[in-house]
Structure formats: C-alpha cells, structure tokens
Image (cartoon, helix red, strand yellow):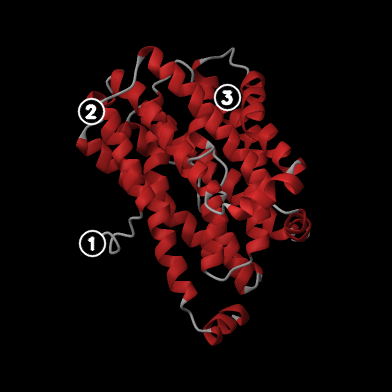
C-alpha cells in the first residue's frame, strides 16, 4: 500500500511529527532550547551542501545559462504569478492566513536534494540540476524576503523592512554554504566515507523544524482554525498548482528545443518548492504571525511533489533509449 501511494520513510516521519506536535507539543524553555538545536542543525545542513557541491559541477553547470534562466523564470515568476492570480479564489476558500502561506510557498526557491536525486534517477542532466537547484536556493535567500515584504507583510505592516530578514537568512543559510565550499577539500573526503550524513541532516533538520513549528501552532489553536474541509481544499489547491506548473515545465522546454536530458533537469528543478529552506525562512520572516498556518501549504505541497516526482522519475528511468532519443528529436 505504501509503494502504491509512493510514500517513503521521510513522508511518514513528517506525518508522525505533525501528529506528535498535536498530541505532545513542546513549549516553554524546552522549546527555546529545541529551537537553538534546530537552528544549528540547519546551519550544518547547508554547510554540508556547500561541501558536497564540486567546483567542476559548478563550472560545467554555469555554462548552461539558458537552462538556469528558464528554471529561474519558473521558480520566481511563473509560480508567484499563479499564486497572485489565485487570490480571488483562494482567500474565500482557505482564508487570509492560509492564502499567505500558499503565496509564500510560491515565492520559495526550488529544492536541492530531491531535484538532483530525481534528475539522476530519470537519467537527466545531473550537473545542470545541481547548479540550477543550488543557484535557486542562493538567490532565493534574497528574492523571497523581498517578495514576502512587498506582497504579504507590506500589506499589513507598512514599515516592514526586509533587510534584517535577509541578513538573518544569509547568516543562517548562505554563510554556512560558502564555508562548506571553502572547506570542501578537507570535509568532502570524510563525507565520502559517510555518504548518508547529508541525508540524515537534511531530513533530520526538516523533521525538527516541522515539529517545533507545529508545536507552537497547536498551542495557538491551529486545528481549531483549520477544519477537515479546509484541509481538503488546501490539498486540492496545491495539487492544481503542481499540475499546472508540471505541465508547463514538461512542454515549454520541448517547445524551446532543449534536449531530453535538459528537459528532465528543468522539469524536476522548475516544478518544486523547498521545505528545507522554506520553514527556516518562515520563522525569520513571519515573527508574531501564525507560523503553523504559513508552513502548512508548503508541507502539503512538498509531500505531493515528492510522490508525483517519484512516480515520474521511476517511469522515465525505465524508458528505453530509443524512446528517449525519439523524444529528444521531437
């Protein structure tokens, strides 16, 4: 049944964190200590991401600027435009706060780990996927706070200045990433001996952040504000958004003449949104706001995208070479 639903261990653990936060939310001084540990885990995660990314992959991937430009356009133009256009429909359907979370999700960069993994499974251009996903996350540290300040917080807090948020996000995510790049010759050999260390920190830090965020949200009465009907409507809205962007990410690269390997890299990088960077950004940007309502859309969208992309990547991995060549020629 789990294979049929494309549920992996991480997806199940995320659901467990939500249930655990609902039953036994962390609060008080314990929550403060837990928050410090979570922040440290996120910083270590981005340090490891920086150390894992090879200079050769960066150079090779950066040469393919057309691919990166298209992924950038999907991530920071197509998604936000669709999110803004959906406002007249989603605000009456979901309420203002959940719509803010939905729009915040549209402003987020792409994923790193899963974009690369799915591109590799589907036999796509992995080097370009590495660079495109990493570049998306780096540039998103600056673009996402500006979009949030202009389209969300600027509507309610007219004196909101994104500068301090950008500095905090840079210190938390970008500085560790750069340090990882600088120390790569010393760190990467140890990472090769422990290949699962990045995955452990990737998944572990997200699980910790989700548990902490939902604990505070439950204490603030999250499940009194979100009914079962609203949750189903949110799942439907996220599914529609993912369907539209995936169809565009599938056909636009073909129309523009990208080869088969590049099409796959664009598809997986351009149609996804990051939970690993999204929740820490939300904690910094939405201080004093209902954080559980803000991160709920990206949590749901993240699970749907992983399930759908897993099925598609496995399908493409079994595609005969003849069909792949024919697809490239068409």
Residue drawn at point x = 62 percent, y = 82 percent: 329
Q: Which residue is mark 3?
A: 149
Residue drawn at point x = 41 percent, y = 56 percent: 243
Single out the mark in the foreground, 3 or 1. Answer: 1
* Left or right of residue 321, residue 6 in this image: left
Marks 1/2: CA–CA distance: 26 Å
Secondary structure beneath dot 2 equals helix
Single out the mark in the foreground, 2 or 3. Answer: 2
Secondary structure beneath dot 3 equals helix
- Placement of 293 over or under 235, stated as above or below: above
* Quadrant assignment for the C terminus: bottom right
Residue contact at pointers 1 and 2, CB within 8 angstroms = no
Point out residue 286 in the picture as x, y percentages from the top left corner.
49, 22
Q: Which residue is mark 2?
A: 23
Q: Badge 2 local density, few (<14 within 10 Å), some, or many (20+)?
A: few
Q: Badge 3 local density, few (<14 within 10 Å), some, or many (20+)?
A: many
Answer with mark 1 or mark 2, whichever residue precedes in sequence: 1
Q: Which residue is mark 1?
A: 1
Residue contact at pointers 3 and 1, CB within 8 angstroms = no
Can residue 249 be seen here? no
């Amino acid at each position: 049944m789990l294979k049929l639903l494309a549920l992996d261990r991480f997806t199940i653990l995320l659901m467990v964190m939500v249930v655990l936060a609902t039953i036994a939310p962390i609060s008080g001084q314990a929550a403060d200590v837990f928050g410090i540990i979570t922040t440290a885990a996120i910083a270590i995660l981005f340090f490891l991401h920086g150390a894992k990314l090879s200079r050769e992959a960066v150079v090779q991937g950066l040469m393919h600027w057309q691919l990166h430009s298209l992924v950038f356009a999907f991530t920071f133009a197509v998604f936000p435009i669709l999110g803004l256009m959906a406002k007249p429909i989603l605000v009456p359907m979901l309420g203002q706060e959940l719509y803010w979370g939905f729009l915040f999700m549209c402003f987020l960069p792409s994923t790193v780990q899963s974009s690369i993994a799915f591109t590799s499974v589907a036999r796509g251009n992995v080097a370009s996927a590495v660079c495109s996903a990493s570049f998306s996350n780096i540039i998103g540290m600056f673009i996402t706070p500006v979009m949030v300040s202009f389209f969300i917080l600027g509507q309610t807090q007219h004196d909101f200045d994104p500068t301090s948020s950008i500095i905090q996000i840079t210190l938390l995510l970008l500085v560790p990433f750069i340090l990882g790049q600088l120390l790569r010759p010393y760190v990467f050999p140890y990472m090769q001996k422990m290949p699962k260390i990045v995955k452990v920190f990737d998944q572990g830090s997200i699980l910790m952040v989700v548990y902490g965020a939902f604990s505070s949200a439950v204490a603030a009465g999250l499940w009194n504000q979100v009914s079962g009907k609203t949750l189903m409507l949110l799942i439907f809205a996220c599914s529609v958004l993912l369907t539209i962007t995936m169809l565009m990410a599938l056909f636009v690269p073909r129309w523009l003449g990208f080869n088969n390997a590049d099409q796959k890299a664009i598809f997986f990088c351009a149609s996804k949104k990051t939970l690993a960077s999204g929740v820490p950004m939300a904690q910094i940007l939405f201080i004093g706001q209902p954080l559980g309502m803000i991160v709920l859309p990206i949590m749901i969208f993240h699970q749907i995208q992983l399930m759908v992309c897993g099925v598609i990547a496995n399908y493409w991995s079994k595609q005969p070479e003849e069909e792949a060549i024919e697809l490239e020629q068409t």
